Amino acid sequence: MTDAGEPLPPGDTASQDEASLHGIEQDLDHVDEALAALDSGDLDAAEALAAGLDSPGAPAPDDERRNGDEQEPAC
């Protein structure tokens, strides 16, 4: 799939492999960020980053959440 979520043309395996590799690299970056947050003792940020890994395609939490300025969700 492309960044826009569109399927790649059939037979375009090189592009599919590249897209897959890009996704793996992003996941590894999120793991590194979560581990760094754990090392610094910021458990809220580590939990938020780990939650992003549980949901494929979920964006990483923004800087406000990492700094502990998160807001309660509206009910």
Image (tube, rainbow, N blue to C red):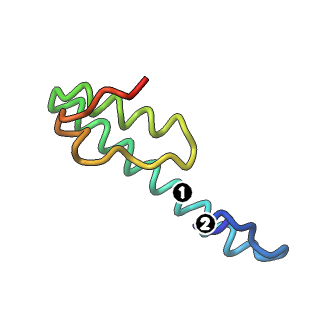
> Mark on residue 19?
2
- Residue at image coords 75%, 67%: 7
* Image location (x, y in percent) of residue 74: 39, 28
Name the side, left or right, on which 69 lies relative to 58.
left
Name the side, left or right, on which 69 lies relative to 52.
left
* Image location (x, y in percent) of residue 3: 58, 67
Given residues 49 and 63, the one toward you in this image is 63
Q: Residues within 10 Å of mark 1 (few under 14, many from 20)?
A: some
Given residues 36 and 57, the one toward you in this image is 57
Which amino acid type is shown beneath numbered disc 2?
Answer: Ala
* Image location (x, y in percent) of residue 48: 35, 33
- Residue at image coords 39%, 47%: 60
Q: Secondary structure at mark 1?
A: helix
Quarter holding the C terminus is top left
Circles 2 and 1 in contact, beta carbons < 8 Å: yes
Which amino acid type is shown beneath numbered disc 1?
Answer: Gly
> Mark on residue 4?
none
Residue at label 1?
23
Up the image or down, 32 lies above or below 26; here it is above
- Residue at image coords 17%, 38%: 67
Q: In terms of image quadrants, where is residue 72?
A: top left
Up the image or down, 57 lies above or below 46; here it is below
* Image location (x, y in percent) of residue 10: 84, 73
Q: Secondary structure at mark 2?
A: helix
Residue extending furthest right?
A: 10
